[in-house]
Image (cartoon, rainbow, N blue to C red):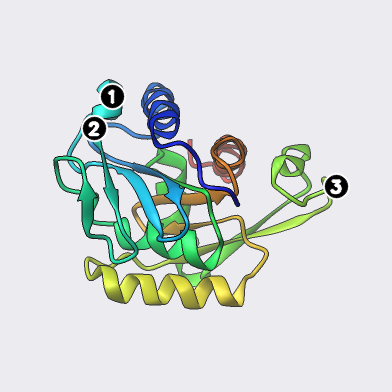
């Protein structure tokens, strides 16, 4: 994955955040979005915490290092910065997107005791990187939420190691995390997965 220009990345993410708000995936101040702008050393640009995603601008991002410490910009990074850094390292993600949709929240609670659920048989699965057929079975892990970000990052890392082909995971009662090698791929994954979450939710009578 090649790091992207920070200004371009922030513009892309700001517009994506507004789109997510309009779709009901990032209401209030929920959600956080990041992109890798340097690999050596690792630097991410990430949305500052507590901001309305409907009104996000390129000035609403901070840059953080591999420890999650701010190296540029004003404001505080999301409390979940550690998860973005982890995904940039263990999945070599170029961008990480986190949303709080109704469907993701409901399904994360419904299937929490199973540790996740399968999604299969849908043509839209082919929008996920590496998936070539609608017969693909996608396991969507569900991880118990934790306010201790260091502990949560450890559980996420272990879960992803157990499911190396997963394109995403859900935090219980919280929302979806997905990523991609590029901003465009991450956006595609987000749209595909949120669509599939709604389809699965409606099929299971959650509407």
Q: Nearer the viewer, residue 95 or 27?
A: 95
At x 64%, y 69%, the residue is 164
Check disc 2 and report the residue beneath it.
Answer: 60
Image marks 2 and 1: residues in contact by CB distance under 8 Å: yes
Check disc 1 and report the residue beneath it.
Answer: 57
Whether residue 1 sits left or right of residue 65 in the image: it is right
The span from disc 1 to disc 3 (Cα, nearest Å) is 38 Å
Within 10 angstroms of label 2, few (less than 14), some, or many (20 or more) residues?
Answer: many
Whether residue 7 sits left or right of residue 50 in the image: it is right
Q: Earlier in the sequence, mark 1 or mark 3?
A: 1
Observer-side mark, 2 or 3, equals 2
Whether residue 50 sits left or right of residue 169 in the image: it is left
* Tag 3 secondary structure: loop
Image marks 1 and 3: residues in contact by CB distance under 8 Å: no
Q: Could you say which quadrant of the image residue 25 lies in?
A: top left
Q: Is residue 66 above or below residue 186?
A: below
Residue 59's spot in the image, x, y percent?
24, 29
At x 48%, y 35%, the residue is 207
Residue 77's spot in the image, x, y percent?
22, 49
At x 84%, y 48%, the residue is 132
């Amino acid at each position: 994955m090649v790091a992207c220009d920070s200004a371009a990345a922030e513009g892309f993410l700001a517009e994506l955040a507004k789109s997510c708000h309009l779709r009901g995936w990032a209401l209030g101040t929920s959600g956080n979005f990041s992109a890798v702008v340097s690999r050596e050393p690792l630097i991410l640009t990430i949305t500052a915490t507590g901001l309305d995603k409907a009104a996000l601008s390129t000035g609403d991002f901070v840059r953080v290092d591999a420890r999650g410490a701010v190296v540029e910009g004003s404001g505080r990074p999301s409390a979940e910065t550690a998860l973005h850094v982890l995904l940039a390292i263990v999945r070599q993600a170029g961008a990480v997107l986190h949303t709080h949709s109704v469907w993701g929240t409901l399904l994360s609670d419904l299937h929490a005791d199973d540790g996740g659920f399968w999604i299969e048989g849908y043509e839209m699965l082919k929008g996920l990187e590496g998936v070539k057929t609608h017969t693909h079975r996608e396991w969507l892990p569900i991880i118990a939420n934790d306010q201790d970000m260091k502990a949560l990052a450890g559980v996420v890392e272990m879960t992803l190691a157990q499911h190396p082909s997963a394109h995403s995971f859900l935090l219980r009662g919280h929302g979806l995390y997905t990523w991609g090698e590029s901003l465009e791929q991450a956006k595609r994954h987000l749209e595909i997965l949120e669509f599939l979450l709604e389809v699965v939710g409606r099929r299971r009578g959650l509407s």
